[in-house]
Amino acid sequence: MAQVRFNHVYKTFNKVEVVHDISLDIEDKEFLVLVGPSGCGKSTCLRMIAGLEEPTDGEIYIGDRIVNGVDPKDRDIAMVFQNYALYPHMTVFDNMAFGLKLRHFPKDQIKKRVEDAAEILGLQQLLKRKPKELSGGQRQRVALGRAIVREAQVFLMDEPLSNLDAKLRVATRAEIIKLHQRIQTTFIYVTHDQVEAMTMGDRIAVLNGGVIQQLGSPQELYDHPANMFVAGFIGSPS
Ligand code: ADP
Ligand code: MG
């Protein structure tokens, strides 16, 4: 069964259609990349899964449940944004624990989850530090940690590397791939960067103008681009 499903989903803002008839099955535990140029509707798709926007038409499923109208906090998702502002006055531990405290998790469970996430991300030695005492890459890992502690079925990431410099971006890409292998959940990863998409995705959905142009493995997109747009965007030779 698909973990996340779009069934003929449309989204209109102020009479402008930004998502047009998207149907998409995202499989359990896969790493799906949603890639396309700025303004093509990527974030809107992710925000509809998270419940931060509602479809104008069509259904979104998480597992076997239609989640239209379901409150974001009642969806089994965790999200990492581009601007992952950490709370500057809180330690790394408290930044990672914050979402669990809000949800009234017991203290010992919070401690265990934060320590487990810190171990996965190599943050064990940094739990007492404040964000300003961390490097950019370490801060990015704390942002990932805040999502990991949720232990959600679906992990949503919206251009999580775009605030990092080029060198760090490449290193963090590899870390996110490792993280996916380690925590074995469904990742839906949004980027406008085709290299990121081609190196990270099990499958890639290429979006343009609110329409999925093609869905396939990196190899399929490269070898058999469905149209000129995909060929140009992916940089395929054909
Ligand atoms: P992407 O993430 O691919 O850059 P978005 O999903 O953010 O694209 O936006 C798609 C289109 O929808 C853009 O034209 C954007 O201006 C518009 N849009 C997004 N959110 C809103 C909103 N809340 N109100 C009005 N227009 C919006
Ligand atoms: Mg966006």
Image: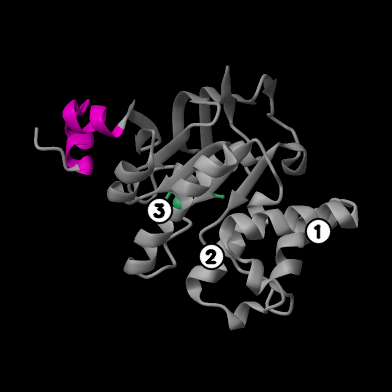
Span colored in magenta: 218-234
Q: Amino acid at mark 1?
A: Lys
Q: Position of residue 237 (x, y in %)?
A: 9, 37
Q: Could you give the CA–CA distance between mark 2 and mark 3, rounded to whole angstroms?
A: 13 Å
In the rendered image, the residue lying farthest to the top is 1
Numbered circle sitting on residue 140? 2
| Above or below 59: residue 160 | below
Q: Residue at x 16, y 33 (%)?
A: 228
Assess whether mark 1 and mark 2 are in contact (beta carbons under 8 angstroms): no
Q: Say which amino acid is labelled 2.
A: Gln
Give residue 32's position: percent from left, percent from top. Answer: 44, 35
Residue depicted at x 65% and y 46%: 78
In the shown orientation, is residue 154 left or right of residue 205?
right
Check disc 2 and report its element: helix, strand or loop: helix
- Left or right position of 98 against 168: right
For image coordinates 21% across by 36% down, the residue present is 229
Q: Nearer the viewer, residue 118 or 90?
A: 118
Is residue 14 visible from the viewing direction of this image?
no
